[in-house]
DNA sequence: CTAAACTTTCAAAAAATACTGAAAGATAAA
DNA sequence: TTTATCTTTCAGTATTTTTTGAAAGTTTAG
């Protein structure tokens, strides 16, 4: 396979995976493109590369900065902005984990905590089943939360090392 | 909060979380409804509870069976089918992890392996960057894969016990 | 066999989501 | 101040995803 074709395949695959996980395709593709780019790119170059509109490119680049995955660069004597992706895959993983935790997991835990407080008659099967499901899911969510918290602070090698030792 | 209101909130929250993670809202909601139901429910009851059409209910129930999250029950002397959710949250987590691994992670790893084989000039920054990103992501993906594999075989208490010991 | 009870299918409609492009808004150099 | 360059916004459009509902299919009882 040619490098050009391979880069294309990478961008496409990343886009597909993203959309399966609730991340919009363009966002995943711009990120992929920047991951493959040694140099920072301009909005113009990104539009061109992926055949997308200026509006789409602009909004998505903004989003990617919001996820902490890319950064804006300025060059002396130039007005236009350049975008560069963090290439450290462990950083990327942590960044995504941190954001999804904050945006999605934390709110759910908040609701589950509320629902845990609902009182009722343990003899009522409807209540008993509700109670058990909420309680168990809450426990799972909190275990995931604690694990993420620790992962966010960890070094990559130490992290996987410990995991594989644990599961040896 | 009332039990009825709380059940509603649970179903709604589960639906929202699902859709943020690429799982269709109806699917997450039917699953939530069944998680709260002590008894197995008929298609009719599910349609009624969630105000959805027969077609939607039927297809989504089929999907949920495909994910291994619910099962069909038959009752002596009755024609209609009843649906029951597995209430064991650890089983659910493993089931979802197993399916997503099979459906999404495995195919991506296959592509990354292919892309890893692409040869080129290490002096070419385009190639070097491509090569590094593909290599690093592939490594991460394989670590996740191995970890999932082990998780799938593990008992809940042992699993979290080991995790928290490791991170103490 | 026929009818009743139930399930499945799928084309069409609706809803949700993503994208475009042109106009308005900034900023900086002339 | 004016002009040129670049960025942002957002109403309208397009695309994708989900849902509906009616018709066709299946199974069992009589």
Image (tube, coloured by chain):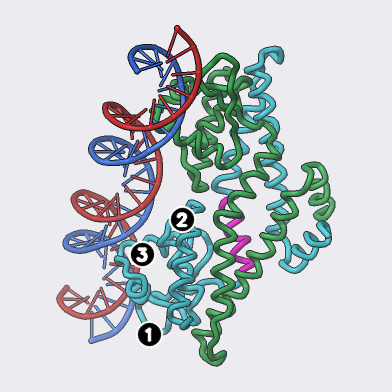
Chain colours: A cyan, B green, C blue, D red
Q: Which residue is mark 3?
A: A58
**Numbered tag placed on residue B123 in the rendering:** none
Examine the structure image and report whether residue A99 is included in the region drawn in magenta. Answer: yes
Q: In terms of secondary structure, where does tag 2 sit?
A: helix
- Quarter of the figure with residue A15: bottom left
Q: Which residue is mark 1?
A: A77
Q: CA distance from mark 3 to mark 2?
A: 19 Å
Q: How many marks?
A: 3
Are marks 3 and 2 in one subunit? Answer: yes
Q: Residue at x 36, y 64 (%)?
A: A58
> Is B163 rendered above or below residue A132?
below
Question: Mark 1, chain letter?
Answer: A
The numbered mark, 1 or 2, whose residue comes first in the sequence reads 2
Q: Residue at x 62, y 66 (%)?
A: A91
SS majority, magenta:
helix
Query: Where does the image place residue B108, in percent across and percent down from the top left?
Result: 55, 64
Q: CA distance from mark 1 to mark 3?
A: 22 Å
Foreground pick, D30 / B104? D30
Which span is picked out in magenta? Answer: A89-100
- Quarter of the figure with residue C12: top left
> Is A81 rendered above or below residue B22?
below
Tell me if C18 is positioned left or right of B8 in this view: left
Examine the structure image and report whether residue B48 is included in the region drawn in magenta. Answer: no
Contact between marks 1 and 2 (CB within 8 A): the answer is no
Q: Residue at x 51, y 31 (%)?
A: B30
Query: Where does the image place residue B51, in percent across and percent down from the top left?
Result: 41, 25
Q: Which residue is mark 2?
A: A19
Foreground pick, A143 / A153? A143
Tell me if B155 is positioned left or right of B141 in this view: right
Q: In terms of secondary structure, where does tag 3 sit?
A: helix
The numbered mark, 3 or 2, whose residue comes first in the sequence reads 2
């Amino acid at each position: 396979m040619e490098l050009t074709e391979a880069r294309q395949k990478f961008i496409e695959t990343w886009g597909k995976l993203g959309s399966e996980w609730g991340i919009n395709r363009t966002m995943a593709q711009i990120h992929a493109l920047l991951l493959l780019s040694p140099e920072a790119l301009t909005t113009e170059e990104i539009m061109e590369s992926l055949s997308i509109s200026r509006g789409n490119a602009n909004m998505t680049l903004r989003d990617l900065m919001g996820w902490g995955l890319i950064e804006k660069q300025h060059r002396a004597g130039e007005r236009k902005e350049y975008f560069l992706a963090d290439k450290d895959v462990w950083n990327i993983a942590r960044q995504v984990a941190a954001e999804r935790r904050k945006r999605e997991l934390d709110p759910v835990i908040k609701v589950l905590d509320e629902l845990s407080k609902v009182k009722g008659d343990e003899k009522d099967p409807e209540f008993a089943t509700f109670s058990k499901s909420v309680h168990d899911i809450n426990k799972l969510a909190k275990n995931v939360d604690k694990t993420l918290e620790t992962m966010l602070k960890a070094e990559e090698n130490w992290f996987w090392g410990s995991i594989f030792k644990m599961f040896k």
